[in-house]
Image: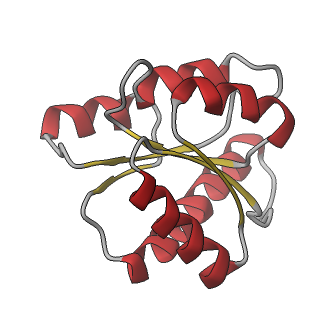
Amino acid sequence: MTELKRILHVDDEDDIRFIVQITLEIARGYEIKSCASGKEAIEIARSFKPQLLLLDFMMPELDGEETWKGIAAIDGLSDIPAIFMTAKAERSNTDRLMAAGAEAVITKPFETNDIADMIDDCWEQHTRKAASSTGTAV
């Protein structure tokens, strides 16, 4: 299984970005790039080459889905798994995101102790799916 190292986190709330970055860097040693907007994330994704996206669902200008599509349009980043975070956990939104290929939808507020485990679980599921679709052993 490929080790998860680089996560691109996008959220328009400063406190959420700070909490997530500190939690994931300390808990798992991930390299986190935090962005305040979808536009900034698309620009950074080109050079950062994230392995996983952690996207706020509702943001001004570009929302999480639009940001995901923008990053997926970059050469080499079309298959980056995405996890969405939202305070608006309506079933219709969650169902739509999951049907579009999201790995998970995390409801805000979340327990900081649980977020690293949720990300690890999603990464494991993603790598298993990718391995089974290519016939590679995990």
| Residue 132 at x, y percent in the picture | 68, 50
Quadrant of image for the C terminus:
bottom right
* Residue 59 occupies quadrant: top left
| Residue 81 at x, y percent in the picture | 59, 43
* Residue 99 occupies quadrant: top left
Give the residue at x 47% y 20%: 66
Q: Height in image: 108 above or below 87?
A: below
| Residue 13 at x, y percent in the picture | 39, 48
Give the residue at x 75% y 20%: 74
Of the pair 32 and 51, the residue shown nearer to us: 32
| Residue 58 at x, y percent in the picture | 31, 33
Give the residue at x 18% y 43%: 88
Give the residue at x 61% y 65%: 124
Of the pair 22 and 3, the residue shown nearer to us: 22
* Residue 114 occupies quadrant: bottom left
Side of 8 where 61 appears, left or right:
left
Quadrant of image for the N terminus:
bottom right
Side of 51 where 17 appears, left or right:
left
Side of 87 where 26 appears, left or right:
right
Give the residue furthest to the right.
Answer: 47
